[in-house]
Image (tube, rainbow, N blue to C red):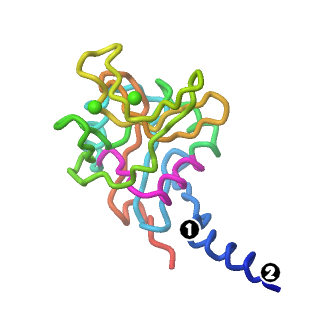
Amino acid sequence: MNFALSALALAVLWTLAYGRTELANMMDETEVCDPKTGIVYKFFPQFRNRWDLARDKCQDDGGKLATINYQGLHRRIKRHINAYPDTLTPQGLGYWFGLNDRIEEGVYKFVDNEDFVYTEGWYSEALGGVMVSQPNNNVDEDCHGQDCGQLWRRPKSGPAYDFDDAYCLELKSFICEYPAGTGGCVIEA
Ligand SMILES: [Ca+2]
Ligand SMILES: [Ca+2]
């Protein structure tokens, strides 16, 4: 009995924490509605842009580079990317999103200046027995380091699409977001 109750409690907690709400396709799988918030996300897996040009493209389009600042949304986006061949292979091994520390090294913000709080989203892996965690502001290829956030297509088998700071001049796909209600995306009760 105790075991059954414990299992039930765990199931309820799991559902509350990791509810399997999915992003809903709109025009196709590259344009989706988040039924939790009514916000629309658009993936550009065929485009290759620098981070600042991706940011401008989203703004010109009436949106902004996506803000991903809590676990539920990050999980929904990761599941969506992995569910469709068109979104599974971004250019440059990743999707730019709004996260960046371009103004002050180590102080991460989104494009609308929202503070970054969801630090569990960073990628980490063991390399040669050493744990390498992002953000690492790698300076190997640019002495200014890495200041622009991507959802990284790594590891190669079963990519996690967790957060990495990358060189802003790299050419990558990107994800824009548009205000709640755009294109008829509504919050589900
Ligand atoms: Ca940096
Ligand atoms: Ca990095």
Is the CB–ligand 2 distance for label 2 below 8 Å?
no
| Image position, residue 70 (x, y; %) | 42, 58
Where, quadrant-wise, is the N terminus in this rendering? bottom right
Q: Amino acid at mark 1?
A: Ala
Please provide percent x and percent y for residue 123: 49, 38
Q: Residue at x 80, y 78 (%)?
A: 3
Q: Residue at x 48, y 52 (%)?
A: 74
Of the residues shown, which amino acid type is indicated by label 2? Ala
User: Seen from this angle, which residue lies furthest bottom?
Assistant: 1
Q: Residue furthest front?
A: 129
Q: Residue at x 25, y 47 (%)?
A: 109
Q: Nearer the viewer, residue 58 or 137?
A: 137
Which stretch did the figure color magenta?
64-80
Residue 9 position (above or below residue 157): below
Q: Which mark is residue 4?
A: 2
Residue 178 vertical position relative to residue 127 in the rendered view, above or below: below
Circle on res. 17: 1
Q: Quadrant of ligand 2?
A: top left
Which is nearer the N-term, disc 2 or disc 1? 2
Q: Secondary structure at mark 2?
A: helix
- x and y, in percent, of residue 105 in the image: 22, 34
Task: Answer yes or no: disc 1 within 8 Å of ligand 2.
Answer: no
How far is disc 2 from disc 1 in space, using C-alphas?
Answer: 20 Å
| Pointers 2 and 1 in contact (C-beta within 8 Å) | no
Please indicate whether residue 124 sits to the left or right of residue 148 in the image: right
In front: 136, or 163? Answer: 136
